[in-house]
Image (spheres, helix red, strand yellow):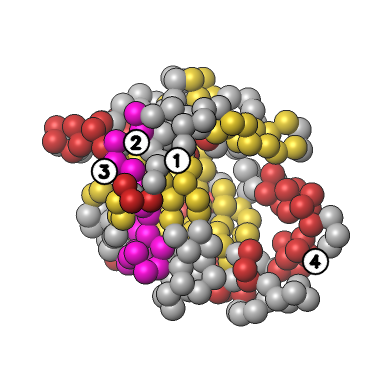
Amino acid sequence: MLSKEQQDQYRRDGYLVIRGFKDAAAIAALRQRALQIVDDFDPAEGSAIFTTRNQAAASDDWFLGSDNTVRCFFEEAAFAADGTLNQAKALSINKIGHAMHDLDPVFGAFARDPRLAAIARDIGLLDAKVWQSQYIFKQPGIGGEVRWHQDATFFDTTPVSVTTFWFALEEATVANGCLWVQPGGHTGPMRERFVRDGDALSMEQLDDMPWPDNSVAVPLEAQAGDLVIFHGLLPHYSAPNTSPVSRHAFTLHATDGTSSYSKRNWIQRDAALPVRGFE
Ligand code: FE2
């Protein structure tokens, strides 16, 4: 699936952009399904968490229970001081996560793509396991910043294997919060590890190497349908969306089944929902 040049580029830079990977029909189907999920979502289920005194604990519960389900998460800036939404529900959701690719037929059809299986093999995943799907809205005006991080922080395996498949579902620009990456930064150490111990979540500091200066970051502007693949150790961030247009994207995170997946990762699959590959 990938040329020698693309494979070399991925190894050198830690990322690769494939233009026009998904067609307009596939994108439209995913977008429509995501909006339906949001429409069906009762904010009383999830938004109550922002208005109770036990906000942090309740939102952790909502988050922790989403590894084997499909749940909507609000944008932090979506709420007024009194806990009501400042804009329509459909414009208030930060993301949907985290098991749509295994539980929803439309998402499943998008994620189970033989070309993705081939790409995964080409970049060295011998036995790809797709742990997570996220539909990210990056809403106009309130879409929040995601600071510098490495995705391996959230999917610890030995050796490091997690790979991100990031699909633009709309045009992504510097104005609406596209990805920024540090080319070649995947050769650096893993800085942090996000761990779950029972119901407690914490971030462990592993290496004090600082995050790159923003001046070395490269923006990955993209058109709807473009696919960005990047290495789990590649430092990346996205700026807040201060523009009037949304920046929908869909991501899949896959590890190599031949590596060992940490029992401390927050996503652990129930026996009824075993982790699967791209096929
Ligand atoms: Fe990330």
Residue 21 visible somewhere in the drawing? yes
Task: Say what secondary structure mark 4 lies in.
Answer: loop
Task: Judge by depth and name the residue closer to the eye, 189 or 265.
Answer: 189
Task: Say what secondary structure mark 2 lies in.
Answer: helix
Separation of residues labelled 3 and 1 (CA atoms): 21 Å
Q: Earlier in the sequence, mark 3 or mark 4?
A: 3
Q: Do the residues bearing badges 3 and 4 touch, measured as CB atoms within 8 Å? A: no
Residue marked by disc 3: 16
Q: Which disc, if any, is residue 211?
A: 1
The x and y percentages for residue 180 are: 36, 52
Residue marked by disc 2: 185
Q: Nearer the viewer, mark 2 or mark 3?
A: 2
Task: Judge by depth and name the residue closer to the eye, 198 or 106.
Answer: 198
Task: Say what secondary structure mark 3 lies in.
Answer: strand
Quadrant for the C terminus, please: top left
Q: Amino acid at mark 3?
A: Leu
Q: Do the residues bearing badges 2 and 4 touch, measured as CB atoms within 8 Å? A: no
Q: Report the side of 79 relative to 112 (left or right).
A: right
Q: Amino acid at mark 4?
A: Thr
Q: Nearer the viewer, mark 1 or mark 4?
A: 1
Separation of residues labelled 3 and 4 (CA atoms): 42 Å
Residue 183 falls inside the magenta stretch? yes
Tag 2: Cα neighbours inside 10 Å, few (<14), some, or many (≥20)? many
Tag 3: Cα neighbours inside 10 Å, few (<14), some, or many (≥20)? many
| Residue at 45%, 40% in the rendered image | 211
| Residue at 23%, 57% in the rendered image | 20
Residue marked by disc 4: 51
Q: Amino acid at mark 1?
A: Trp
Task: Say what secondary structure mark 1 lies in.
Answer: loop
